[in-house]
Image (tube, grey):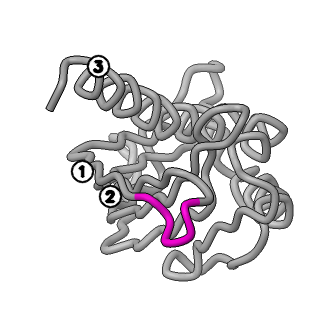
Amino acid sequence: MTQRVELATMRDRLAVDGLVTEYAVAVDDGDWEAYRGLFTPGGRADYRSAGGIEGDAGAVAGWLAESLRAFPVRQHLIVNRRVRFGVWEQDTGDTAQVQADYVSPMGRTGRDGMSAAPDFVCGGRCAFAMLRTDEGWRLSEVVMREKWRRAPERRAAPGIN
């Protein structure tokens, strides 16, 4: 492999990794315009394993905005990213597949304005399909595969039975 090819591959790896990060930040910040902008035209997302919907990025952004309203404090931790590159069969563009694990604590804001302990935590694996476009790498599909979820144990305040 030549140095030029290796450099191009490293640039692509950094770009697709950055796209995964932008995805997580858009969801955590509730920036649904940015979320939609991360997808190709016709890009889709599938949250059915977490009790959600599957559809085009615009419809899914609307569903996320509504369903996550109850948890304004969110933090997606996306780790163990595995990146694979390929070329479409008809040579219409470069593709990438990223598989990553996630943990997502979510909570409400406490009375003092500070975030309380998470009210809900879930984790699983996410598959990102990406396409290189004239605007750079974009998501063509996101599939969330929730593996577990839990609500942290609630403890009574001292002196309350």
- Residue under the image location 65 percent in, 36 percent down: 26
Residue 79 spot, x, y in % from top left: 26, 43
> For mark 1, what is the residue?
82
> In percent of the image, x 72 and y 32: which residue is there?
135
Give SS at disc 2. strand
Residue extending farthest left: 1
**Residue 137 falls inside the magenta stretch:** no
- x and y percentages locating residue 11 in the rendered image: 38, 23
Q: Earlier in the sequence, mark 2 or mark 1?
A: 1
User: Looking at the image, is mark 1 or mark 3 earlier in the sequence?
Assistant: 3
- The residue where tag 2 is placed is 99
How far is disc 1 from disc 3 in space, using C-alphas? 22 Å
Q: Main secondary structure of the magenta part?
A: loop
Q: CA distance from mark 2 to mark 1?
A: 5 Å
Instruction: Give the quarter of the image for residue 59.
Output: bottom right
For the residue carrying disc 1, how many other residues have a C-alpha within 10 Å: few (<14), some (14-19), or many (20+)? few
Q: Secondary structure at mark 3?
A: helix
Q: Image point 67% across, 42% down: which residue?
A: 133
Spot occupied by residue 146 in the image (x, y as percentages of width and height): 40, 72
> What range of the chain is rendered magenta?
87-91
Quadrant where the C terminus lies?
bottom left
**Relative horizontal placement of residue 77, taking residue 39 as reference (left or right):** left
Residue in front for this viewpoint, 160 or 94: 94
The reply to whether discs 2 and 1 touch (Cβ–Cβ < 8 Å) is: yes
* Residue that carries the numbered disc 3 in the rendered image: 4
The count of marks equals: 3
